[in-house]
Image (tube, helix red, strand yellow):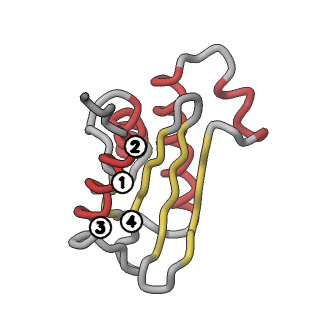
Amino acid sequence: MFSKIDKNQERQRRHARVRKQLAGTAERPRLVVYRSLSNIYAQIIDDSKGVTIVSANTVEKSLASALKGKNKTEQAYVIGETIAKRALDKKITQVVFDRGGYLYTGRVKNVSDGARAAGLKF
């Protein structure tokens, strides 16, 4: 009998494997992407202090008008632009991109493309 593979558990293993090597510092914090079935979340984290510096997600009421009428990949691009603008307001220009164990395609790629277009370097 075959057992069904838990894709989220496999993603968490990949993420843990990458996180052994990848860490955000005060000079270059970590941009993390989490993708659920219906929403996307992005945070910029300083791992040396263990604090989230800025965050953006599709659940925020302040972004509802900007996200209305867009599909999920277009919303991900807007989230990337938003988090980059918020980071630049906090004087953060360079980050380390952490894809969270997801494949670098679709919504995850659009978050990074939006962040790069708005001025973040990684």
Looking at the image, is mark 3 or mark 1 earlier in the sequence?
Answer: 1
Give me the C-alpha separation between circle 4 and circle 1.
17 Å
Q: Are marks 4 and 1 in contact (CB under 8 Å)?
A: no
Residue nearer the viewer, 122 or 18: 18
Residue beneath disc 2: 8
Residue 112 at x, y percent in the picture: 36, 43
Q: Residue furthest bottom?
A: 49
Looking at the image, is mark 4 or mark 1 earlier in the sequence?
Answer: 1
Looking at the image, is mark 2 or mark 3 earlier in the sequence?
Answer: 2
* Quarter of the image where one finds residue 106: top left
Residue beneath disc 3: 19
Residue beneath disc 4: 30
Q: Amino acid at mark 4?
A: Arg
SS for dot 2: helix
Residue 63 at x, y percent in the picture: 70, 36
Q: Amino acid at mark 2?
A: Asn
* Quarter of the image where one finds residue 26: bottom left
